[in-house]
Image: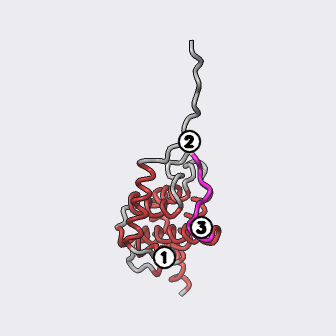
Amino acid sequence: MREGRASQGVRRTREFQAFMAGAAGRLLHTATLLTAEPRDANPRARRLLTLALAHTYASWDRLHGEDPYDSARRQLAARFQRTLWYQYGGLGRRRTSPEHVLAALTPQERLVLVLRLYEGIAEEQAAALLGLPVERVRTVCARAMATLLHPPRGPAPARVEVAPS
């Protein structure tokens, strides 16, 4: 009996390690995009990923043929959303790296944009994952794209008076 559980634990660990070898890099990149941190300094993204992967590992035996990447991605999105809700009372602004291309977006806009464009999730799936209507996901994604493609202008330059020559 003990040997059966031990071999099952070894099998589970090997399967999870194989999954990690293939998916950890992409999931870390997804988490880094969500947190809008620089690639080389992303402690919030790493913590988010660690918690999502820990949950995926804990539920590994209950996946029953389900895609483990999809499960980890769902956990990542849910934890990102939950973290913002508890810390800020909603999906408001979060401190990001100012030089990051996604820093101009709200966390909700980043979440929808990353899921839709980077992860390639359909609007309907993203809406179900986030608990939002499909129209809301479409609107948030369009607003995020507009912000990225046409960033707000900075203040107008100061008027300089030139002395007549």
Residue at x 41% of width, y 55% of height: 145
Q: Is residue 63 magenta?
A: no
Residue 90 or residue 45, whichever sits in front:
90
The residue indicated by pointer 3 is 84
| Segment tinted magenta in the rendering | 89-98
Whether pointer 1 and pointer 2 mark residues with C-beta atoms closer than 8 Å, the reply is no
Whether pointer 3 and pointer 2 mark residues with C-beta atoms closer than 8 Å, the reply is no
Q: Secondary structure under badge 3?
A: helix
Q: Tell me if 158 is positioned left or right of 70 in this view.
A: right
Tell me the tag on residue 155: 2
Task: Let me know if residue 18 appears in the view.
Answer: no
Residue 113 or residue 54, whichever sits in front:
113
Location of residue 26 in the rendering, given as x and y in whole percent from the top left corner: 45, 57
Location of residue 161 in the rendering, given as x and y in whole percent from the top left corner: 59, 25
Is the residue marked by circle 2 packed among few (<14), some (14-19), or many (20+) residues within 10 Å? Answer: few
Outermost residue toward the bottom in this view: 1
Residue at x 39% of width, y 72% of height: 67
The residue indicated by pointer 1 is 60
Residue at x 37% of width, y 72% of height: 134
Q: Secondary structure under badge 2?
A: loop
Q: Amino acid at mark 2?
A: Pro
Q: Tell me if 85 is positioned left or right of 114 in this view.
A: right
Relative height, residue 6 to residue 73 (above, below) = below
Question: Does label 3 or label 2 sit earlier along the sequence?
Answer: 3
Task: Let me know if residue 40 appears in the view.
Answer: yes
Q: Is residue 91 magenta?
A: yes
Is the residue marked by circle 1 packed among few (<14), some (14-19), or many (20+) residues within 10 Å? Answer: some
Foreground tag (1 vs 2): 2
What's the magenta bit mostly, secondary-structure-wise? loop
